[in-house]
């Protein structure tokens, strides 16, 4: 609510930012039309994961790092396994990789559906939450919940449960799902494909603020497929590095108003990870159905307005459903669900595409299989500075708007990135201060 | 009948237990019709405030600000329910309670002096009285539905008191400890998950915390006599529920 203080300082404080994972707030300081500062204050309490991982066994890492995020536990599990298995030179069975990929795709569906329908769409329809949408568009919500549930069922079928699944282990999987159980889900997903395609059109039809700018996109690239569970790190600035090159090219910084560290490129530039980066850089690798959906709404790279992220996410939803159908068709129960490995001392690097963008893990391991050091860089930490820059650019519109609209626009600018603050601090409140 | 007023609150945690509420899917729509959601920041920007008939609290208390916040929520709530291992026992982040906070801060942050953390990450019950606990990492959706149903009907929810072993036997799993020598916390862990891990051929790692009656000392001795290294048992107990009373006392006695 706007209040004008005696010293002509105008403060607009809209309270904790909703529909994001975690706790944070946004402050905009302005003098007249001039924006003095934009700060994403993150007060999500630190949980010190990198510290207590020290001294644990490599086998324990997968189930521990999962707990960094309840929304994308599989991303944490897969990045960790990628790192440690690469270090030990584990020859993971191709069918085991497929099972992990299917589990990951389930998480993408669940997370994307959650974000699109429950967190982002209420903004565009100007209502507080999904239950308000249900009052006027019951079918939309019902269909959305069906897709979301199918993502969850994929996770539960493979991983035993939706949140913090238990089936992945260093070297392989504890138990392989039956082909029949996956086929049943695949069939159900097929009947949701039409709704996913409609979602792309719905997301494209939403009125979005214009915010065009030069963006550095960073994502994974895989020669064989639309990169999700593994790949090299690439950018639209000519970067192409293996996971081990991450810390040579990106660095985390600490701001005094944030318990989340924030990433920049080594040359000090911000960058963007997530659905918009991926759809831009891996456009040709999208499944033909997803590509057709993108073309139909005129989504063709370069798409640089961050508000188009919701469209990118919907395109990925179509892609994910199609990819699940392909993978399930090819799946055969693995002969070797678990591969043998021997410990070796060294530094392990792993990345994967969490629903929100690339998730980097690095572990230092001794010859007895103990973790001696860890570094985890979640996607939200990499997007934080971009978010501030977007809000800064959008500030003239935000400052000119009435308080409620100012809050809605600011939150949308943050929510484009589907920030996961619990991850980033291992995040929002809006404050507008006018001097 | 007036609808019960619900508040969902998050402290130090991963959001996974709150997500379980959204994961109710079909039941969620019924739920939305039968209760008055006053506060649920992860799902709605519409914050109406207390008082609450029922408050679901996720996460552990790990900062001075959180202490103030949980006391206010307690004052405004008729029934306060902790959801998940973080809220009930401190969670995985309580592993820092066994170490120096300063060293932990320095490990993760270049400017540790900017961070406000309490010395220990503790359960909600360490600060305020708690009416019911939903255990688990994450909680069980079935228990969540049961809790809502009971609250709507003015009865008490029936929550498990048995160990994971009971459910594991009902599922006719082959015992992973006896048959394969895999260390498993099933005999000392509260049921609620449906014995997922042993059903996947792996040992239970204690997500739901200690069962009502446990003898960890005796069970650890038994595991050792069956060839499992004390350090392995130690690490297994020193996990998600390391700071629950029973697990902590055993760890401190070692």
Image (cartoon, helix red, strand yellow):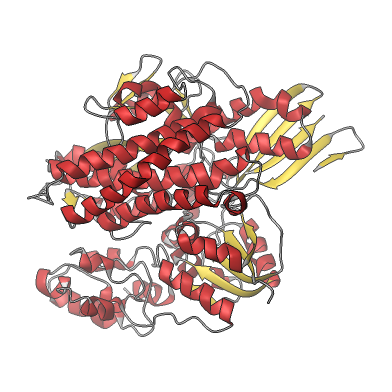
Query: Is the C terminus of chain B in the top left, top right, bottom left or bottom right quadrant?
Result: bottom left
Residue farthest to the left, as pictured: A335
Q: Is residue A264 left or right of residue A244?
A: right
Q: Residue at x 22, y 68 (%)?
A: B198
- Which x, y percent locates residue A97? 19, 42
Query: Is the N terminus of chain B in the top left, top right, bottom left or bottom right quadrant?
Result: bottom right
Choose top left, top right, bottom left or bottom right for residue B76: bottom right
Q: Residue at x 27, y 57 (%)?
A: A157
- Which x, y percent locates residue B148? 53, 73
- Which x, y percent locates residue A339? 11, 48
- Which x, y percent locates residue B219? 24, 80
Q: B188 above or below A250?
A: below
Q: Is residue A313 left or right of residue B9?
A: left
Q: How many marks?
A: 0
Q: B150 above or below A393?
A: below
Choose top left, top right, bottom left or bottom right for residue B163: bottom left
Closest to the observer, B31 or A229: B31
Q: B7 above or below A113?
A: below
Do we see residue A278 in this rendering? Answer: no
Closest to the observer, A416 or A39: A416
Q: Residue at x 35, y 63 (%)?
A: B239
Do we see residue A121 in this rendering? Answer: yes
Closest to the observer, A253 or A105: A105
Closest to the observer, B152 or A81: B152
């Amino acid at each position: 609510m706007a209040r004008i203080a005696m010293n002509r300082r105008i403060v607009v404080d809209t309270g904790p930012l909703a529909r994001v994972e975690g706790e944070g707030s946004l402050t905009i300081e302005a003098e007249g039309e001039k924006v003095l500062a934009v700060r994403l204050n993150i007060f999500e309490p630190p949980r010190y994961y990198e510290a207590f991982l020290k001294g644990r066994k490599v086998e324990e890492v997968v189930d521990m790092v999962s707990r960094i995020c309840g929304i994308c536990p599989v991303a944490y599990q897969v990045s960790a396994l990628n790192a440690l298995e690469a270090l030990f030179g584990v020859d993971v069975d191709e069918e085991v990789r497929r099972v992990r990929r299917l589990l990951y795709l389930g998480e993408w569906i669940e997370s994307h559906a959650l974000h699109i329908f429950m967190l982002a769409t209420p903004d565009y329809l100007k209502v507080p939450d999904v239950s308000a949408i249900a009052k006027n568009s019951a079918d939309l919500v019902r269909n959305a919940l069906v897709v979301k549930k199918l993502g969850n069922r994929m996770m539960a079928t493979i991983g035993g449960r939706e949140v913090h699944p238990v089936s992945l282990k260093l070297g392989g999987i504890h138990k392989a799902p039956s082909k029949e159980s996956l086929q049943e889900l695949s069939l159900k997903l097929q009947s949701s494909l039409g709704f996913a395609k409609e979602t792309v059109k719905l997301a494209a039809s939403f009125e979005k603020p214009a915010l065009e700018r030069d963006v550095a996109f960073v994502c994974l690239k895989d020669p064989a497929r639309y990169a999700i569970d593994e790949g090299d790190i690439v950018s639209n600035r000519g970067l192409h590095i293996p996971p081990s090159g991450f810390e040579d090219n990106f660095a985390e910084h600490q701001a005094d108003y944030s318990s989340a560290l924030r990433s920049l490129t080594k040359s000090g530039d911000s960058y963007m990870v997530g659905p918009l980066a991926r759809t831009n850089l891996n456009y040709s690798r999208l499944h033909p159905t997803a590509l057709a959906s993108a073309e139909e709404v005129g989504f063709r790279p370069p798409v640089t307005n961050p508000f188009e992220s919701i469209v990118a996410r919907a395109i990925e939803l179509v892609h994910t459903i199609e990819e699940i159908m392909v993978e399930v068709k090819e799946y055969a129960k693995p002969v070797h669900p678990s591969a043998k490995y021997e410990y070796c001392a060294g530094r392990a690097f792993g990345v994967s595409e969490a629903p929100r963008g690339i998730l980097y893990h690095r572990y230092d391991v001794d010859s007895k299989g103990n973790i001696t050091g860890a570094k985890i860089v979640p996607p939200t930490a990499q997007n934080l500075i971009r978010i501030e820059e977007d809000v800064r650019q959008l500030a003239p519109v935000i400052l000119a708007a009435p308080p409620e609209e100012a809050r809605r626009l600011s939150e949308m600018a943050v929510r484009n990135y589907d920030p996961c603050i619990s991850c980033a601090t291992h995040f929002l409140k809006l404050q507008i201060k006018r001097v | 009948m007036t609808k019960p007023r619900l508040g969902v609150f998050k402290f130090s945690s991963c959001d996974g237990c709150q997500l379980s509420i959204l994961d109710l899917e079909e039941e969620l729509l019924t739920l939305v019709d039968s209760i008055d959601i006053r506060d649920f920041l992860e799902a709605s920007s519409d914050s109406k405030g207390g008082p609450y008939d029922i408050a679901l609290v996720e996460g552990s208390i790990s900062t001075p600000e959180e202490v103030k916040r949980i006391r206010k929520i307690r004052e405004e709530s008729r029934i306060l329910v902790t959801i998940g291992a973080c809220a009930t026992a401190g969670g995985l982040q309580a592993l820092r309670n066994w170490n120096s906070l300063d060293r932990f801060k320095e490990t993760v942050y270049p400017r540790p002096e900017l961070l406000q953390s309490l010395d220990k990450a503790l359960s909600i019950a360490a600060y305020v009285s708690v009416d019911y606990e939903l255990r688990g990492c994450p909680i069980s959706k079935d228990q969540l539905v049961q809790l809502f149903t009971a609250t709507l009907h003015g009865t008490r929810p029936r929550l498990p008191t048995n160990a994971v072993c009971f459910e594991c036997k009902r599922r006719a799993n082959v015992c992973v400890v006896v048959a394969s020598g895999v260390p498993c916390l099933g005999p000392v862990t509260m049921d609620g998950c449906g014995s997922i891990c042993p059903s996947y051929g792996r040992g239970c790692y204690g997500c739901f915390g200690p069962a009502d009656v446990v003898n960890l000392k005796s069970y650890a001795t038994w595991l050792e006599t069956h060839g499992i290294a004390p350090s392995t048992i130690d690490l297994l107990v020193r996990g998600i529920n390391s700071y629950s009373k029973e697990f902590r006392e055993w760890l401190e006695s070692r």
